[in-house]
Image (cartoon, rainbow, N blue to C red):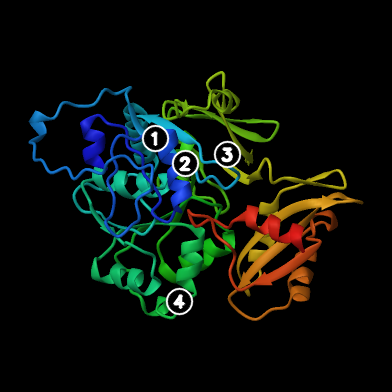
Amino acid sequence: MFAVLASGAQLVPLNPLYTLPELETILDDAEASALIVDPRLPVPRNAPMTRRVEAEFTSAELPLPQADGLALLQYTGGTTGTPKGVNLTHRAIATNVAQREALLPTALDCERILCVMPLFHSYGMAMGLFLAANCRGTLVIQERYKPELLLAAIEREAITLFPGSPTLYTSLMAHADFPRTNWNTVHTCYSGAAPLAEETLRRWEAAVGAPIYEGYGQTEAGPVLSFNPVRGARKAGSVGVPVPHTEIRLLEGEIVARGPQIMQGYRNRPQETAEALKDGWLHTGDMGEFDADGYLFIRGRKKEMAIVGGYNVYPREVEEALCAHPAVAEAAVVGGPDPYWGEVLHAYVALRAPATSEALLAHCRERLARYKMPATLEILDALPRTSVNKPDKLALRQRWMKS
């Protein structure tokens, strides 16, 4: 990845779990000139001629790429349609590394980072690869997520920084080896990629002893927009304050942001670029609120918000209520049409301990207004996941529509 960036070429990270048709769509759009591929993986029919590049250069021989030249073409997850390629410049990426460092400073030459987040994803790249290079630390990469191997690596590699996600934290705490793992060397954990339930944060910190700093961003934002700062208040349920030189505002509840790390636009999609970038402001599609101290709280996706009997209801609030139940490992809530209420909510949960739907709904009634209550609640063995390991709400919505 660094070799491609250093060469001045534009890097297109690809998810190895994509199907051949998904890869072919991206390669067509990117018009890739070369493909570097793991020999264990199938190669799409439309792939450019694969090349094995073997060369050695000293740093003095490599001219630096142009700061405003395109560095990354990073494709979004595509859970709601065809993936869109996000164009990011070298300046935007370097700036965002410095912005993150301002709120979450690292120590030079001594940090040891365990990266199990996929490196084709903006979160794994920013909080794993780029973070490790910036602090001249050691990056320990787990090829696949296997909890027993990850937990063993924590001790064996004397990890100091652990970037994770809500799904990862929940899964690790449920594993039999978790109580036996020594986390003494870990002084900082990060969370991103999806909202972190407050109950998950509290349970993790009580067990591990290291704080979780939750942040917020998206591929189009380079990706980091905000984080709870190391030097300052850390608020459970909040994604913190804007990183330096970044403005975040709420436009009718939607989070819009402006800063030097924002994308140039979507490749080959002028109309969607114009819709996302208006007068220099990135419209994120996420809904949020600020508290009196300027800390941002995510309330859900704009498209996910349900209007139940005229009231706006954000799935995140209902998910938080469900996750507060001790038996719930994970929850996802989606909206769907209803002839009387206009829309109603449907909840899906995965459990860590036995519980009934009736008990979970009774738990919610103690915490939610009546119009926020799920109309249905289904217990699953596990929630379906997207290619970047988020709960797949599109699949859940389709599941409900078929029921």
Badge 1 vs badge 2, beta-carbon distance below 8 Å: no
Whole-number angstrom distance, CA of label 2 to CA of label 4: 37 Å
> Between disc 1 and disc 2, whose residue precedes?
2
The secondary structure type at the circle numbered 1 is strand
> On the image, numbered disc 4 is attached to which residue?
175
- Mark 1: amino acid: Leu
Considering every residue shown, the one lying at the far front of the view is 45
Disc 3 versus disc 4: nearer the observer: 4
Disc 2 versus disc 3: nearer the observer: 2
The secondary structure type at the circle numbered 2 is helix
Crowd class of label 1 (few under 14; some 14 to 19; many from 20; radius 10 Å)? many
Whole-number angstrom distance, CA of label 4 to CA of label 1: 36 Å
The secondary structure type at the circle numbered 4 is loop
> Between disc 3 and disc 4, whose residue precedes?
4
Q: Is residue 159 above or below residue 268?
A: below
Q: Is residue 376 left or right of residue 112?
A: right
Whole-number angstrom distance, CA of label 3 to CA of label 4: 37 Å
- Mark 3: amino acid: Asp
- Mark 4: amino acid: His
Badge 2 vs badge 4, beta-carbon distance below 8 Å: no
> On the image, numbered disc 2 is attached to which residue?
25
The secondary structure type at the circle numbered 3 is loop
Whole-number angstrom distance, CA of label 1 to CA of label 2: 14 Å
Residue for point 46% across, 39% down: 219
Badge 2 vs badge 3, beta-carbon distance below 8 Å: no
Badge 1 vs badge 3, beta-carbon distance below 8 Å: no
The percent coordinates of residue 57 (x first, y second) are: 8, 36
> Between disc 4 and disc 1, whose residue precedes?
1
> On the image, numbered disc 3 is attached to which residue?
293
